[in-house]
Image (tube, grey):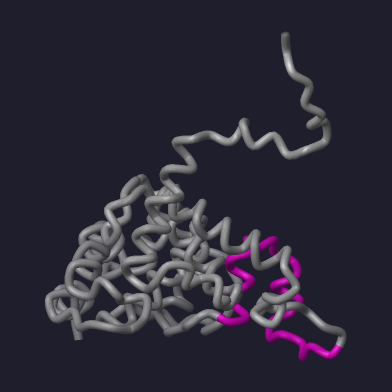
Amino acid sequence: MTGIKHDQGKPPFELIDPWALEGLARVLAFGAEKYSPDNWRAGLDWRRVIGSMERHLAAIKRGEDIDPESRLPHVDHVGCNWMFLSNFMKLPAYQPHDDRWKPTASSAPEPERETRDAIVLPAGAREWLANGERSVASETIFQHLTGIPINRDRISHPRDAADFRRCQLLLEQVPEFYDRLREMEGLSTAWSRLVNSWSYLEDLLVREAPDWRDQRGIAPALNECLAEMVGP
């Protein structure tokens, strides 16, 4: 005899992969230990969640599987951020945390608007133009890879850890630029040296200042290395 269960039209939770759920749970456990259980339910600015998700995606795209801080897979961190954002977007209580940039009729015209409109930019690149942390060096990367004139003919290089950090933030926000970083080699001898050592410089930054995204920590070895590569 077989019982009857009317569950047509209900979410088929049995289709959810248990290994993916376990990975999500491990990231949540790491967050609970670092902050507190259910800390995220107090609300987070949406752009911070999106930025975190994109940073982990950028790491995956460049071939890195494990997050150096948590020692857990980047893909599970992506899933965790997705869960946060899915919850925030569906519940009215979290709408005040929606800090995404949205165009309005009264928005001031952007500089070089015609040039920008003529070029199809990745979403992350448009967000960086509107709200990203900038330096002349990161603007040099943006200008060279898009053709959009920000600093005209001025070429700059990351000369210290703070400058390198802003370049790295741009590359994480726009993973497509990271994939094209080698195109910077032809810009100058210094850029050629930087591009060929970029992975090493990234490792230095993470080792010396694990919380570099939050502008915490110092990186003297990175500063010294950049000074040698770029020169006075």
When asked about the image quadrant of residue 215, the answer is: bottom left
Residue 61: tell me if it is visible: no
Nearer to us in this view, 182 or 9: 9
Q: Which residues fall within the magenta stretch?
A: 106-131
Residue furthest toward the right?
A: 105
Could you tell me residue 113's position as x and y percent? 74, 79
Which residue is at a point 69% across and 64% down the rendered structure image? Answer: 119
Question: On the picture, is 207 further left or further right than 214?
Answer: left
Numbered-mark total: 0
Which residue is at a point 45% across and 49% down the rendered structure image? Answer: 24
Could you tell me residue 171's position as x and y percent? 44, 65
Question: On the picture, is 13 further left or further right than 50?
Answer: right
Q: Quadrant of the C terminus?
A: bottom left
Which residue is at a point 18% across and 67% down the rendered structure image? Answer: 207
Above or below for 105 versus 20: below
Q: Quadrant of the N terminus?
A: top right
Could you tell me residue 40's position as x and y percent? 51, 71
Question: On the picture, is 66 further left or further right than 46?
Answer: left
Residue 38: tell me if it is visible: yes
Could you tell me residue 166's position as x and y percent? 39, 78
Residue furthest toward the front?
A: 1
